[in-house]
Image (spheres, rainbow, N blue to C red):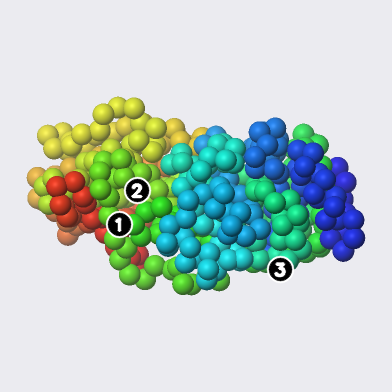
Amino acid sequence: METISITDPRAPAAMLATLRAGGLVIAPTETVYGCFADATNPDSVTKLLAYKRRPAGKAISVAVADQKTAEQYVSLTDQARAIYRNFLPGPVTVVSASRHLADRRLESEFGTLGIRIPGHDWLLSVLRSFASAVTATSANASSQKTPYTISDVLTRLSSKQKNLIDLIIDAGTLPKNPPSLVIDTTTSTPIVMRPNAAIDQFSSTTNQTYLTHDETETYALAGKLLLQNWSTLCQTGLIVALDGDLGAGKTTLTAGFGQFLGINAIINSPTYTYLKEYPYTKFEHNGTLYHLDAWTIDRPELLAALNLDACQKPSNLLVIEWYEQIAPFFQPRVPLLHLKLRVTDQTSRSITMEAQP
């Protein structure tokens, strides 16, 4: 492992040579120290995944020098182009449909890829010379401290992880900027997967409405909404409250949650049993999806008999169909996401997510 100061004139050439040789580089961005490897080299990506110790299936974004290069790797929607035009280079990761030219292990399970164009002049100059995509993930191992110094990185690594690093570009202590905002532009309305307090243009103060045109799109939206709220689900548990007319797709959306969580059982309406439960393991977390049909629950004592408090625990997802039926006498103990479904035509649905208070 070699360390070079960012002010050393040899630093750009050293980073380029290391990337081209399949190595792993720790270098600064405008947010945090990042870990960079050739995103098209399977050996480099394998090395990166071993370093990050990230749970299987969790996507890793890539960095490029400009939009033209980005379009080699992803298909951009009009929404994505507007974000590129207005916010990049900068601390924004734009998720788009992948063209599958980067290593597939970097993609999400939805076939999407996050793209960064860093707002860091030194790093951008290296990326222009490399003329390809590199991984753009923070230099800390999964769940470790956000890295604003090289010490933040190295003091929390095992010897095995340290030995995977080929080059460090040291820029001293970085300003404590938050990690990049992550926004998925593959849905009818972009979904902020990770917020950034410095970019309030994407903060949601109004209801968000998404359109799905078939079951596949509904399943994908369900998964992305859970991924958006994954930290909350793991830390405290999560309630998803569903309302809409009969046939609006409440059970289909619940089945989409189940698919994302890797549940193989068929999820159907628990009308006659009130509550069904489905254990799951996802991203190394064990939990249970509880599915409640509240259509015939018309008094508090009937709801109390179901003991929903026991369902509201970290990593548990409680999905309630016909939520408005029990809302007057149900007291949530964990965060609640309220979705209202409406049929727009024979195959399409609108799903409105109410803004959080």
Q: Which mark is residue 157?
A: none
Image spot of residue 166 (x, y percent): 82, 42
Q: Amino acid at mark 2?
A: Leu
Q: Callout 3: helix, strand or loop?
A: loop
The image quadrant where one finds the N terminus is top right
Q: Which mark is residue 175?
A: 3
**Residue in the picture at 35% in, 65% down:** 356
Image spot of residue 220 (x, y percent): 36, 44
Quarter of the rendering containing residue 187: bottom left
- Residue 254 in sight in this render: no
- Judged by depth in the image, the label closer to the viewer, 2 or 3, is 2
> Is residue 231 left or right of 159 when viewed as pictured?
left
Label 2 sits on residue: 221
Image spot of residue 254 (x, y percent): 27, 41
Q: Callout 1: helix, strand or loop?
A: strand
Image spot of residue 108 (x, y percent): 49, 42
Mark 2 and mark 3 lie on one chain; the one further toward the N terminus is 3
Mark 1 and mark 2 lie on one chain; the one further toward the N terminus is 1
**Residue in the picture at 40% in, 59% down:** 190
The image quadrant where one finds the C terminus is bottom left
| Label 2 crowd bin: few (<14), some (14–19), many (20+), radius 10 Å | many
Front one among 207 and 329: 207
The CA distance from mark 3 to mark 1 is 36 Å
Q: Which mark is residue 210?
A: 1
Q: Are marks 1 and 2 in contact (CB under 8 Å)?
A: yes
Q: Callout 2: helix, strand or loop?
A: helix
The CA distance from mark 1 to mark 2 is 8 Å
> Is residue 247 left or right of 104 when viewed as pictured?
left
Query: In the rendered image of this protein, does residue 47 appear above or below residue 5?
Result: above
Query: In the rendered image of this protein, does residue 91 appear above or below residue 112?
Result: below
